[in-house]
Image (cartoon, grey):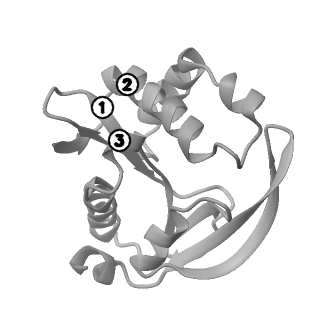
């Protein structure tokens, strides 16, 4: 397994992981018709833009066959006005690769980048019904707020967490 910074050629692989991981992660949380209608092509185009945007830091995890099996992204959201703060905007892994320490490696790699950039706080937003919130809590993220958002025509609760010590995450 290898983790590296993404390049534009990775957009299709990231798009596939994005769609497939949403379909497993959000099954029973978001409407089935919404999940079933997610498009590899649309996500590939989205990731071409995301990777090309210099304000985003995008990592991929690859298996032994050099296939993209997961990704993580960081970058300061437009809604984040906290001084010296940024956001972990996503970590997704294909279901069969979850629970093997890959998410931990992606998290630490993104946080190392944040540390190098001089950030002091990192926020993450996660759906309340998403079991990965336990992962964030394990690594020290503290709940700060919740909001209601609409995805696929359904109102869902999103939790906002913050890490106040980047070094603790990297060392854990």
Residue drawn at 35 percent across, 41 percent down: 96
Percent x, y of residue 152? 79, 37
The residue pinned by badge 2 equals 13
Residue 92 sits above or below residue 42 on the image? below
Q: Secondary structure at mark 1?
A: strand
The foreground one among 94 and 159 is 94
Q: Can you say whether 116 is above or below 99 in the image?
A: below
Choose the circle earlier in sequence order: 1 or 3: 1
Horizontally, residue 85 falls left or right of residue 31, namely left
Residue 171 x %, y %: 22, 79
Quarter-wise, where is residue 131 in the image? Answer: bottom right
| Residue 38 against residue 94 in the figure, above or below | above
Q: Position of residue 139 (x, y in %)?
A: 39, 77
Mark 2 falls on what kind of element? helix
Reading the image, the residue beneath label 3 is 96
Q: Residue at x 16, y 43 (%)?
A: 2
Chain-order first, disc 2 or disc 1:
2
Q: Secondary structure at mark 3?
A: helix
Q: In screen coordinates, is 26 left or right of 145?
A: left
The front one of 91 and 63 is 63
Q: Label 2, label 1: how many angstroms apart (C-alpha)? A: 6 Å
In the displayed orientation, state which residue is furthest to the top: 41
Would residue 151 appear left or right of 4 to someone viewing this image?
Answer: right
Query: For residue 159, which quarter of the picture?
Result: bottom right
The alpha-carbon separation of the residues under discs 3 and 2 comes to 16 Å
Spatial separation of the CA atoms under disc 1 and disc 3: 13 Å
In the rendered image, residue 60, in percent from the top left (x then y), is placed at: 30, 40
Left or right placement of residue 72 versus residue 127 in this view: left
Callout 2 touching callout 1 (CB < 8 Å): yes
Q: Which quadrant holds the C terminus?
A: bottom left
Residue 120, can we see it?
Answer: no
Instruction: Tell me the residue that label 1 is attached to.
Output: 68
């Amino acid at each position: 397994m290898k983790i590296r910074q993404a390049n534009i050629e990775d957009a299709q692989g990231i798009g596939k992981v994005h769609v497939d991981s949403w379909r497993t992660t959000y099954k029973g949380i978001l409407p089935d018709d919404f999940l079933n209608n997610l498009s590899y092509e649309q996500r590939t185009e989205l990731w071409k833009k995301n990777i090309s945007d210099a304000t985003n830091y995008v990592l991929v995890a690859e298996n032994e066959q050099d296939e993209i099996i997961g990704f993580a992204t960081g970058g300061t959201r437009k809604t984040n006005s906290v001084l010296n703060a940024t956001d972990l905007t996503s970590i997704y892994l294909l279901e069969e690769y979850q629970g093997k320490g890959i998410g931990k490696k992606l998290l630490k790699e993104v946080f190392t980048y944040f540390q190098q950039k001089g950030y002091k706080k990192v926020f993450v937003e996660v759906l309340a019904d998403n079991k990965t919130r336990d992962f964030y809590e394990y690594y020290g993220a503290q709940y700060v707020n919740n909001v209601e958002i609409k995805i696929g025509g359904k109102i869902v609760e999103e939790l906002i967490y913050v890490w106040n010590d980047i070094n603790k995450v990297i060392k854990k």
